Amino acid sequence: MPIATPEVYNEMLDRAKAEKFAYPAINVTSSQTLHAALRGFAEAESDGIVQISTGGAEFLGGQHKKEMVTGAVALAEFAHIVAEKYDVNIALHTDHCPKDKLDGYVRPLLAVSEERVKAGRSPLFQSHMWDGSAETLADNLSIAQELLERTRAAKIILEVEITPTGGEEDGVTHEINDSLYTTVDDAVRTAEALGLGDKGRYLLAASFGNVHGVYKPGNVVLRPELLKELNEGVAAKYGKPAGSQPFDFVFHGGSGSTPEEILTALENGVVKMNIDTDTQYAFTRPVADHMFRNYDGVLKVDGEVGDKKTYDPRTWGKLAEASMSARVVEACQNLRSTGTRIK
């Protein structure tokens, strides 16, 4: 199937919300990790989201000039071609973009999509993330309002992060402390500024103790039940029925989460869960194993030439792709998206 149209992407999110599952959002940094993600979604018979962070885009742009926009556009165009060979719907998303990188990343990419839409085509990316968690909430939401107006016009969905996620992600660092929990007041102020769909659709990365990076279960106190409180507080403020879920939530920093924490998040309105650390590890582990097991073959030892079939990137690259795709399948199972593709 081709990359999801705006209409299909909205249908994907609506379906996830109604049926209480979420799409894995897999960070990619190369054509190979893109194929691994697409393969995993196809094998799980799940639609999904592929995303590129600022650091990933810079890497994709090549080390000669390290241009984020070049890297993001190049992989997105590649994805639009190769995704047609996979029997699932895929949305393209840009991950964490802080204030100092908006003019070098999200805004230029929005301009690309605006031109495509004017020409009667679909946008290049289906959603973009504005990470204003390092700003005051007032400044964060002010910028979000400007971006939401543009994304709405370009048939794109905006993702906003209103309070910090702990740990480090592409240079944005937050301490692990009590600020990692979004309050009902934060949620109400967000609804007041951005509306509840009437000003354009957006995804909300609210914080319930989330931390980026690697951690073991129990090392971080996650409170996914907090999402219910946020929905209830905003629903009451706007006179919506009891039990309604005004927000489409995103789960950041999910590595090490327990199955129970994930299921609680799904029940409370999470429709997207970012997965990066775990898939990086899944991709790298078989490569390291191959290099250790075939040390003499991958290196020129004692004047020898090594074994070309052993150090050929295709040899170990296939192992890496298979391992990462298997982790994507596992993510689909954990998030209950397996078998839910829109045909």
Image (spheres, grey):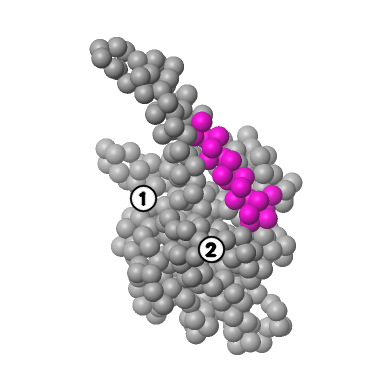
> How far apart in space, not on screen, are marks 1 and 2 (Cα)?
20 Å
- Say which label, 1 or 2, has the lower sequence index: 1
Residue 1 lies in quadrant: top right
**Residue type, numbered disc 1:** Gly
Asked if residue 327 can be seen in this view, the reply is yes
Chain part drawn in magenta: 319-338
**Residue type, numbered disc 2:** Phe
The residue located at (59%, 84%) in the rendering is 233
Nearer mark to the viewer, of 1 and 2: 2
Mark 1 near mark 2, Cβ–Cβ under 8 Å?
Answer: no
Q: Secondary structure at mark 1?
A: helix
The residue located at (39%, 15%) in the rendering is 307
Q: Residues within 10 Å of mark 1 (few under 14, many from 20)?
A: many
Residue 139 in percent (x, y) is at: 37, 76
Q: Nearer the viewer, residue 236 or 149?
A: 236
Q: Residues within 10 Å of mark 2 (few under 14, many from 20)?
A: many
Q: Nearer the viewer, residue 87 or 106?
A: 87
Q: Which residue is mark 1?
A: 55
Q: Secondary structure at mark 2?
A: strand
Q: Nearer the viewer, residue 189 or 337?
A: 337
Classified by dominant secondary structure, the portion drawn in magenta counts as helix
The residue located at (42%, 56%) in the rendering is 213
Residue 3 in percent (x, y) is at: 59, 45
Residue 126 in percent (x, y) is at: 54, 54
Q: Is 325 located above or below residue 148 in the figure? A: above
Q: Which residue is mark 2?
A: 251
Residue 249 in percent (x, y) is at: 57, 67
Residue 311 on the magenta span:
no
The residue located at (45%, 65%) in the rendering is 219
